[in-house]
Amino acid sequence: MSDSGTANGRRGKVVRLIEERELDGIGDRLERRWTAEGEERLSLRDLADEFNRELLRAAMDDAGMQPLDGDVANVYRLLTDDDVSGADRTRTERRLDREGVAVDELRREFVTYQAVRTYLKDHRGASYDPDTGNQVDEEKERIQRLRGRVRTVTDSKLTQLRRNDEVDIGSFRTLVNVNVLCEDCGTQYDVETLLDEGGCDCTNE
C-alpha cells in the first residue's frame, strides 16, 4: 500500500515522517515484521524503536555523518535508554549538535508504539491475529527476543569500543546461547531444545 494519505483521509504522524524523511520501503517492512510468525515478528514497541532508528539514521545522513554499522543503534540507545547515564547522554547530544543534527527536533519526531499501531491498522489495514498456541511456545518466543536484545546491545557496545580504539577487533559476529543444566540428571540443553523436547533426561527416566 502507498504511504501517502490515510484510509480515513487524515495524514498521521508516521505517514508524514515517511514522506518528509523519504523512508522508502519502511512501511512494508513494519507491516511484514508485525504480522510475521515466531522469532521474525516484532512487537509494536520494537517496531517503534526500529522506525525511530531509521529517523535517526536519516538525520545523521542529512548532516553528512555517514554512520557506521552499529553506530545508529548505539546512538539511539544513548538517547533513549533509561539505563544510560546523564553524562553519556549529554555527550551524545553535544556530538550530534556539533555535527548539525537538531536533537530536540529529532526527539519530537520519535514515534510511540501507539502511533505505529494506528499507522499499521488504520492506514495500511493490517491486522495481527496471534496464534494462541501453548505457554511453552509463548515463553520460547520471549526468550528468543531477549536473546536478540542481548546480541544487539553487545554489538553496539563492541562497535563503540572499537571506534574509540579501546578494543582491537575485526569484523565480528556476536553469538548468544542460553544453556540449561539439570543438576539431577546432569544433562545440558540449549533452552529451545529443552522446551521443544518437553524436558530433560529426568523426564525420560
Image: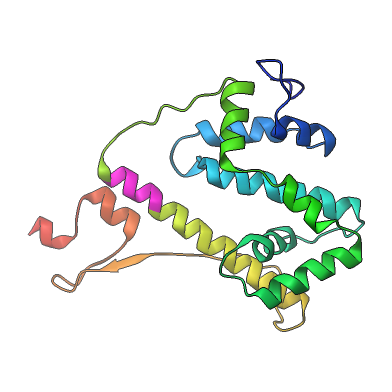
Q: Left or right? Give the position of 2 relative to 192.
A: right
Q: Which percent across, then down, holds residue 6? A: 69, 20
Q: Nearer the viewer, residue 101 or 137?
A: 101
Identified at 77% across, 32% down, the residue is: 16
Outermost residue on the top side: it is 8
Identified at 46% across, 59% down, the residue is: 147
Outermost residue on the left side: it is 205
Q: Is residue 170 visible?
A: no
70 relative to 48, above or below: below
Q: Left or right? Give the position of 146 relative to 172.
A: left
Instruction: Classify residue 100 by image quadrant.
Output: bottom right
Identified at 73% across, 24% down, the residue is: 11
Instruction: Classify residue 75 by image quadrant.
Output: bottom right
Identified at 43% across, 64% down, the residue is: 177
Q: By what rule are the colours in the image chosen?
A: rainbow
130 relative to 94, above or below: above
Q: Nearer the viewer, residue 59 or 163?
A: 59
Characterize the magenta stretch by its predominant secondary structure: helix
Q: Quadrant of the N terminus?
A: top right
Q: Nearer the viewer, residue 188 or 58?
A: 58
Q: Is residue 18 visible?
A: yes
Q: Nearer the viewer, residue 64 or 172?
A: 64
Q: Which percent across, then down, holds residue 18? A: 77, 34
Q: Which percent across, then down, holds residue 105? A: 80, 51
Q: Which percent across, then down, holds residue 2? A: 73, 21
112 relative to 168, above or below: above
Q: Which residues are magenta?
A: 136-142
For residue 36: magenta?
no
Instruction: Classify residue 27 by image quadrant.
Output: top right
Q: Quadrant of the C terminus?
A: bottom left
